[in-house]
Image (cartoon, rainbow, N blue to C red):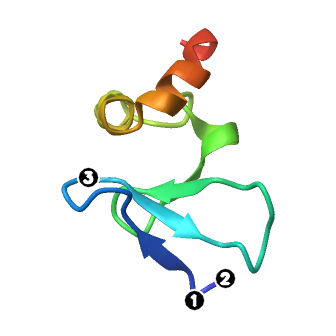
Amino acid sequence: MSDLNFYKEKKKNSIFWVDNALYAKGEHLFSFDKKKIYNLFADYPHNMTAEEIAIFDKEEPYWCDFFKDRK
């Protein structure tokens, strides 16, 4: 998967979403630096730093609410 496509939902956001539709269906991958890639369902919030969680929650309120029982 070295040819991943990164994109932002909003230009000002810090989060890059990974367009990996060619490789997997229903997988939501994202990154803050295009190097370390998180899997939304496996890694949020347990494998993220407090700063990353704060950024993610601010930029992605839908997913923050969706996973509110994980916090």
Residue type beneath disc 1? Asp
Q: Residue at x 61, y 15 (%)?
A: 70
Spatial CA distance of label 3 from label 1 is 22 Å
Spatial CA distance of label 1 from label 2 is 5 Å
Q: Quadrant of the N terminus?
A: bottom right
Label placed on residue 68: none
Quadrant location of residue 8?
A: bottom left
Q: Are marks 1 and 2 in contact (CB under 8 Å)?
A: yes
- Image coordinates of residue 51 in percent, x first then y, are 28, 33
How many discs appear?
3
4 sits to left or right of 49: right
Q: Which residue is mark 1?
A: 3
Spatial CA distance of label 2 from label 3 is 24 Å
Q: Are marks 2 and 3 in contact (CB under 8 Å)?
A: no
- Image coordinates of residue 29 in percent, x first then y, are 59, 57
Say which element carries label 3: loop
37 sits to left or right of 23: left
Q: Which residue is mark 2?
A: 1
Vertical order, 2 against 15 (above or below): below
20 sits to left or right of 38: right
Which comes sooner in the sequence, label 3 or label 1?
1
Residue type beneath disc 3? Asn
10 Å crowding of disc 3: few (<14), some (14-19), many (20+): some
Q: Which residue is mark 3?
A: 13
Say which element carries label 1: loop
